[in-house]
Image: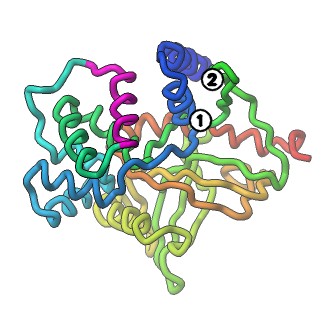
Amino acid sequence: MSQLHSVVSELNSVIQSLPDATHKQFLCNLATGRHTKRIISYTTLADLTCAVANIPLWLFDQCKLHTASISESSALCVPLTDARCKAPSLHYVLTILDQLSISAPSAQRELISTTWMQLHTPERILFNRMLVGGFRSSIVKGLCVSDNYLLSIEAPTFVNGAPFDVTAVLLSVKRDADGFHFHFGIKKNETLVPIVSLPAEAFSEYDRSIILQHADAHTTEKFGPVRVVLPTVFANLRLHNVSAAPRKKSGVEVGKVEVLHIENTTSVLADEGLETLTLNALDKVSDTSILI
């Protein structure tokens, strides 16, 4: 928990250093997991990437099979140049986003291309996610924002029947007579434990393709119809009707589940994401004294 306090303190320093109130609010929204405005579509991002990198769309699609993230594929496909600046400031990037939000499509393409040339690959990935509104923060749970744009850690209150959001990781894929089922888990006592099993129909066609392509490429073990996969696919889920279930490994019983967002990450980002799954504090749900 002290690590989380340290991260929140550093975030607050960054937020307060921004001169623009709208930029402070934007960063608060990112930190607390709120949706941000999409500036360009995924299709536009893919088309522009192909134009700048001078590659055909089919080749870009092949890249997506390995990353399952359009933002990351784009950042990797666009060649690096000597025009890259050293550690561009957050204020600089947010000002670029401001300009893009009010620009015509042709001007957007030119400004995005120019900005890419000034960024390193990790910075491009984050920039692309901000462009398409696909930024996922792994420290959002338990954060709230005050009127003066200060983040604070809020002790989660779990009321039986009240929904709340969690981040879970894909553990395995099962195929039976009813089709595919995807099993997601959380980290509890340093172990990944299952929390929900969802049918493929609960996901969009695009999200299903991400999961199935990942299973094809990164199965680590097979047990009959079940394929255990590399834990790098994360899902933001909204859980309803959560109650204590001491006999379950996760300690909770989940009713309805909404899929908010799916993302496949690199192994480095996955290690960071897995470390933060414990911040969901689902173990506290299993304490029946706080359920009413």
Q: Is residue 277 left or right of residue 125?
A: right
Residue at 47%, 69% (x, y): give it: 204
Of callouts 2 and 1, the N-terminal one:
1
In the rendered view, tell whether residue 95 sits above or below residue 113.
above
Task: Name the one closer to the observer, 44 or 56.
Answer: 44
Specify the quadrant of the image occupied by residue 152.
top right
Residue extent of the magenta highlight:
87-102
Question: Residue 32 has which mark?
Answer: 1
Instruction: Give neighbour class at mark 1: few <14, some 14-19, many 20+ (Cα, 10 Å).
Output: some
Judged from the image, the secondary structure of the residue bearing numbered disc 1 is loop
| Farthest-out residue, bottom | 177
Answer whether residue 6 is visible to the viewer in this image. Answer: no
Specify the quadrant of the image occupied by residue 78.
top left
Q: Amino acid at mark 1?
A: Thr
Residue at 25%, 56% (x, y): give it: 46
Residue at 19%, 21% (x, y): give it: 85
Label 1 near label 2: C-beta < 8 Å? yes
Tell me residue 288's x, y (percent). 86, 44
Q: Main secondary structure of the magenta part?
A: helix
Task: Name the one closer to the observer, 66 or 30.
Answer: 30
Instruction: Report which residue position mark 2 lands on.
Output: 151
Residue at 48%, 71% (x, y): give it: 174
Q: How is the image coloured?
A: rainbow
Instruction: Give neighbour class at mark 2: few <14, some 14-19, many 20+ (Cα, 10 Å).
Output: many
Tell me residue 72's x, y (percent). 28, 46
In which quadrant will I find the N terminus? top right
In the rendered view, tell whether residue 199 sits above or below residue 152.
below
Real-space Cα distance between discs 2 and 1?
9 Å
